[in-house]
Amino acid sequence: MKKIFVLMLLGLLVVSCSNPDKKTGATAVGGGAGNSESVQTKAEVEADSVGYIVKLGDIAPDFTCTLTDGTPVTLSALRGKVVMLQFTASWCGVCRKEMPFIEKDIWLKHKDNPKFVLIGIDRDEPVETVVAFGKQTGVTYPLALDPGADIFAKYALRDAGITRNVLIDEEGRIVMMTRLYKEDEFASLVAKIDQMLQ
């Protein structure tokens, strides 16, 4: 009797620990309310690529940030505009390389277009550091503070790297995401913004 009970218990454990989606390579996302396994699986899949936890076509997670001049900005209030978020930090060498190109090829070209917003979101640094960083890189586009990297964590795994750019359309949907600075990918970002603002 004990043997039968142990065998039945082992059978239940094997069935309950199996994930049929993992066998087929499919991603388990979306599940029912409170299904933390689905959320974790989504995060794991995204972390396997470049760390994003949002996808193309998603409504961009809302947040309110404070610019270095003290102005609050809420993402959802920018609906009807093309929005580019650049996640950055002063200690990031790739960010320092990319930012002058963002300034020259995107910001200076579109800064006077009322349908365009660009915000550099600085990861967990004090305002004095962020202001100095903007001056050092020669950028004039708005920089915002992200204490604790809480805004960043809405878009990517909290410990994932930067630099990253997220492009959002007029309806608030994510249409492009980049990671690091790659000339071809950056050229595609510039072309996409140009096309959206025609």
Image (cartoon, rainbow, N blue to C red):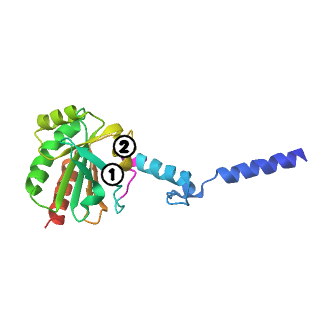
**Boundaries of the magenta span:** 48-55
Q: Residue at x 16, y 56 (%)?
A: 190
Measure the C-alpha gap from mark 2 to mark 1.
9 Å
N-term-proximal mark, 2 vs 1? 1
Q: Residues within 10 Å of mark 2 (few under 14, many from 20)?
A: few
Q: Residue at x 30, y 62 (%)?
A: 172
Location of residue 192 in the rendering, given as x and y in whole percent from the top left corner:
20, 61
Location of residue 20 in the rendering, given as x and y in whole percent from the top left corner:
59, 57
Q: Residues within 10 Å of mark 1 (few under 14, many from 20)?
A: some
Location of residue 175 in the rendering, given as x and y in whole percent from the top left corner:
28, 61
Which kind of residue does numbered mark 2 sit on? Asp
Check residue 171 for magenta coloring.
Answer: no
Relative vertical location of residue 132 with respect to residue 167 in this rendering, above or below = above
Give the left or right position of residue 162, taking residue 195 as reference.
right
In the picture of the structure, the residue carrying the numbered disc 1 is: 63
Give the left or right position of residue 157, taking residue 181 as reference.
right
Name the quadrant of the C terminus. Answer: bottom left
Which of 72 and 116 lies nearest the eye of the viewer?
A: 72
In the picture of the structure, the residue carrying the numbered disc 2 is: 150
Which of 79 and 102 lies nearest the eye of the viewer?
A: 79
Q: Residue at x 42, y 46 (%)?
A: 47
Which kind of residue does numbered mark 1 sit on? Phe
Q: Residue at x 25, y 56 (%)?
A: 167
Relative vertical location of residue 10 with respect to residue 77 in this rendering, above or below = above
Which of 174 and 185 lies nearest the eye of the viewer?
A: 174
Q: Judging from the image, what secondary structure is the residue with disc 1 in?
A: loop
Q: Does the CB distance between marks 2 and 1 fall below 8 Å?
A: yes
Check residue 54 for magenta coloring.
Answer: yes
Location of residue 96 in the rendering, given as x and y in whole percent from the top left corner:
18, 37
